[in-house]
Amino acid sequence: MVDIGGRITLGEGSALLRSTIKDLLAEGRNKIVLNLGDVNYIDSSGIGELVTAFTTVKKTGGDLKLLNLTKKVHDLLQLTKLFTVFDVYTDENVVIRSFQQV
Amino acid sequence: MAPDTKHLEVTLDTHVESVNLAEEMCLRVAESAGFGEDDCYRIGMSVREGVINAFHYGNQEKPDKKIHLAVDITNDKMTIHVLDEGKGFDLSHVPDPLAQENLLSTSGRGIFLMRAFMDEFNVVPGRTGGAEIIMSKKLPGATPVPEAQGGQNATPQQGN
């Protein structure tokens, strides 16, 4: 479970997400939940970073899921038709169980 | 320029921080023009995407190039111009980010978002030789802008 807060935008926010995913994968941890409950803003670079994270994790045989989307992030993912690409959850227990059901 | 037009113009460095600066500046202008929270968010996001496009695609992140940002407030709308010093840009060549084959692309959503969030959107050849994004949002209470205003003009290039 990775808790992310603030803005995922071009620059520091995107770079931090990128390095976090890279570090987790280097440790062999490829079942990842991004808790975006405190992310109040994301731009196209941030969306691109989420997509990159998703495809990179998938290539390792793992999965990346999203938890607690704020309204702005939710609406943007819907607008860009990515809402149906990602597995999105509102309950931490449910998303954790979802990994065990595979 | 009409006498009742307010005009603000800045020249930004081709630097990541210019994106934040441009967003903040235009948000202050939008707030002072009377836009509500939702419209300010859309305007701010659109400015971010326009400047990101200029920074990354237009100016190729070259620090010797500049990004020219201008904002006009008239009686009925706020218009934002973002001009880069690149080579120009053909909107018709920008892939559709909603197409199935592009959904998992890591880039290419900026123009889509600007079109979605602003009432008018266009790209024209700029005085620098680069691309000039022109986008506007009608002021609260102004009469609606006719539809189908976006992106029909094209100059050669890529996109965000």
Image (cartoon, coloured by chain):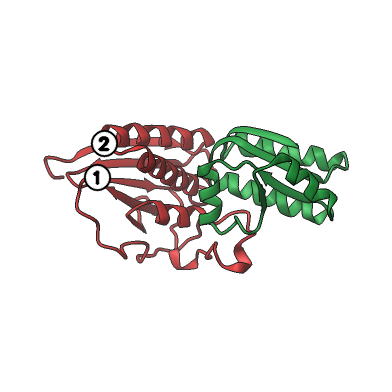
Chain colours: A green, B red
Q: Residue at x 35, y 66 (%)?
A: B152
Three-letter amino acid code of the residue under disc 1: Leu
Mark 2 chain: B
Any mark on residue A98, and which? Answer: none
Q: Which of the two residues, A22 or B89, is positioned nearer the viewer here?
A: A22
Mark 2 packing: few (<14 Cα in 10 Å), some, or many (20+)? few
Residue at label 2?
B34
Q: Name, please, the residue furthest toward the right.
A: A28
Q: Quadrant of the N terminus of chain B?
A: top left
State the CA–CA distance, disc 2 to disc 1.
7 Å
Q: Say yes or no: labels 2 and 1 on the same chain.
A: yes
Q: Which chain letter matches label 1?
A: B
- From this view, report whether residue A74 is shown above or below residue B12: below
How far across and down, in percent of the image, does residue B144 sit? 23, 55
In the rendered image, which quarter is residue B47 located in?
top left
Q: Which residue is mark 1?
A: B139
Residue B94 image offset from top left, x and y in percent = 50, 63
Residue found at the far left of this picture: B3
**Residue A20 picture quarter:** top right
| Residues under numbered marks 2 and 1 in contact, where contact means CB atoms less than 8 Å apart | yes
Sequence order check, earlier mark of 2 and 1 = 2
**Mark 1 burial class by Cα count in 10 Å: few <14, some 14-19, many 20+:** many
